[in-house]
Amino acid sequence: MPVARTVLAETARRTDELLAALPDPERRSEEQRAAALKAVEAARTVRAAFLDAHTDAVYDELTDGRSGHLRIEELVRVAAAVFPGLVPTDERLAAERDRPQAAKEGHEIDQGLFLGRILGSPRSGPHLLDAMLRPTPRALALLPDFRANGWADLGSVRLERTDGVARLTMCRDDCLNAEDDRQIDDMETAVDLALLDPGVEVGLLRGGVMTHPRYRGRRVFSAGINLKSLHGGGISLVDFLLRRELGYIHKIWRGLLDDSSAHWSSRTVEKPWVAAVDTFAIGGGTQLLLVFDRVLAASDAFLSLPAAKEGIIPGASNFRLARRAGSRLARQVILDGRRIWASEPDARLLVDEVHEPEDLDAAIERSLGRLRGPAVLANRRMLNLVEENVDEFRRYMAEFAVQQALRLYSSDVLDKVGRFTLAAPPRGAQ
């Protein structure tokens, strides 16, 4: 591997020099764009060949023979230092962070290539998934206060424990709970706290009451990805798109890997979860519903997954939706952008109960009570085991890491986010 490392570093250096000599991406001529693309593609070919030959050796070196557990954001940071030219450095990404999406070089694609190869390895991939199932340092620091007080205001998410229920309320009323990097961190912290607290028996996720003029006084579940952040370059591949799927969503489904409570009967701490949809669950909001044990919705709510129209991939929905609702409906929702109203028959494939808005609160409490049965956790675990094989999920996420990175910097996506304006109504809220 020493010779290959030298070739990799030298190829990356030459590519960087060429890019540095060119104008910023949005000001390049057609000839300059072609020259940049040719150099970048050649460098990625070298990176891919390096990883195809040395993925497990690279991962072992980065994790000290898999004795350390690095989350994806830590893994790419260490890889940039230990293997020059393999992935972009923090400094390079920081320099692009404040640029609009269309003005970036697309260095995150190299992160997608790297993480895709790691996740695709039957040896290294499972170890990385386990690392992502561990509690975050932020949650561990907040846990003593939460256990004592039963309350945590995380910013975009409020968490309250009442009568054994962890009530997670998404409260980004400035953007109708549209997700960005900040909310991903808050959500994972909240999920960790709910799973770590022995006083919690079941979790509930619901949107808070909004102050937006169009929805003032009403609860809203989620408007999906924050298009303002995407346009401004604030939606990251690692800290948002991959962390979201491998972090809190995966923890809701599979549980928390907690070494402090290791036991021969289970590697994870799991709890049942209920989601309640008010008004709408758009994009990422609908993605979330696919990992909950019980989903309730108001009769006037709707669900949608318009990611294909926006040019991106809706997380793990392509993996899960067909299993839940069948291939035909999955293609209609993902490829055609079909909106599913809670009141129509097909909604029963995605929603367990539909109630009039004024009756939803009482129905939620009844549902929470039913999930407290003594045999619920054991049967939930067995159902999840049959429904979703962890190796199939890992292989999906390996391909997702690459394809979503490419989508973020595709010309159609850059054109769409470039037309996004603050005056535009929230996605699907028209």
Image (tube, helix red, strand yellow):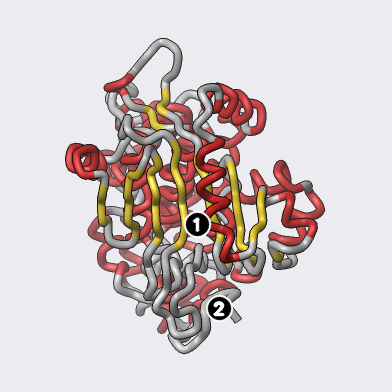
Q: Where residue 429 sits in the image (x, y, percent)?
A: 57, 77
Quadrant location, the C terminus? bottom right
Report whether residue 303 is seen: no
From the viewer's perspective, tell me whether residue 212 is left or right of residue 61.
right
Amino acid identity at mark 1: Ala
Residue identified by numbered label 2:
416
In the current view of this chain or complex, which residue is farthest to the bottom?
423
**Which residue is at 33% across, 26% downward?**
258
Amino acid identity at mark 2: Lys
**Which residue is at 52% across, 77% downward?**
426
Residue identified by numbered label 1:
405
Of tags 1 and 2, the one toward the viewer is: 2
From the viewer's perspective, tell me whether residue 162 is left or right of residue 292.
left
Quadrant of residue 357 within the rendered picture: bottom right
- Pick the residue in front: 122 or 335: 335
**Which residue is at 32% across, 33% downward?**
199
Q: Where residue 134 sits in the image (x, y, percent)?
A: 34, 33
SS label for mark 1: helix
Q: Where residue 198 sits in the image (x, y, percent)?
A: 32, 30
In the current view of this chain or complex, which residue is farthest to the top?
264
